[in-house]
């Protein structure tokens, strides 16, 4: 029953698997972008759950306590914040590319776009 004890990690793995299967199985570009965002959120959840330690506080020195054992590790939180910024910019770029592809090919189905692009080159 280790899965019930580590429910944050279990939820992150399930969310990652759902996002991965969405990216692999769907042909619609918007659904692929949503799957990628789900995978990003799963990684952020996993990193945040690894950085949390029960009974410790945020790494802000208050009340004169300077012991390392009194605070959580701030590095996973910094990685999550950096990852969110990168994820938002990549999502914006992917959505802009999807809009351009839709204007050009009038579809978001990846197979149809590949077929239409192959016909243009001939």
Image (tube, rainbow, N blue to C red):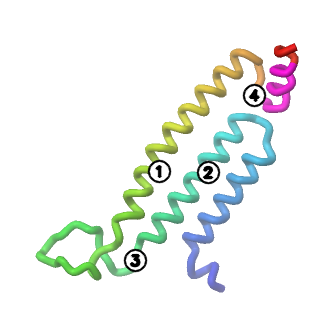
Q: Which residue is mark 2?
A: 38
Q: Is residue 116 above or below residue 77?
A: above
Image side of residue 2 versus residue 64, left or right: right
Instruction: Determine whether 55 is above or below 88 in the image.
Output: below
Please tell me in which quadrant of the rendered image residue 6 appears.
bottom right
| Label 1: which secondary element | helix
Q: Read off the residue under disc 1.
A: 83
Q: Position of residue 34 (x, y in %)?
A: 64, 43
- Disc 2 to disc 1: CB gap under 8 Å: no
**Residue at (71%, 40%) from the top-left corner?**
31
Q: Are marks 4 and 1 in contact (CB under 8 Å)?
A: no
List the residue tagged with mark 4: 108
Along the horizontal axis of the image, is 11 left or right of 113?
Answer: left
- Mark 1 touches mark 3? (CB < 8 Å): no
Distance of label 3 from label 4 (alpha carbons): 44 Å
- Residue sitting at 29 percent across and 75 percent down? 71
Instruction: Provide residue 79's location: percent of width, then percent of height.
Output: 42, 57
């Amino acid at each position: 029953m280790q899965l019930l004890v580590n429910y944050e990690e279990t939820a992150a793995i399930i969310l990652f698997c759902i996002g991965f299967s969405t990216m692999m199985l769907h042909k619609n570009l918007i659904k692929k972008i949503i799957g990628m965002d789900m995978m990003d959120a799963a990684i952020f959840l996993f990193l945040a759950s690894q950085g949390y330690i029960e009974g410790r506080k945020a790494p802000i020195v208050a009340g004169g306590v300077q012991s390392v054992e009194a605070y959580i590790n701030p590095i996973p939180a910094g990685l999550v914040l950096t990852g969110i910024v990168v994820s938002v910019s990549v999502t914006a770029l992917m959505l802009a590319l999807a809009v351009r592809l839709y204007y050009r090919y009038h579809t978001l189905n990846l197979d149809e776009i590949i077929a239409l692009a192959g016909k243009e080159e001939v």
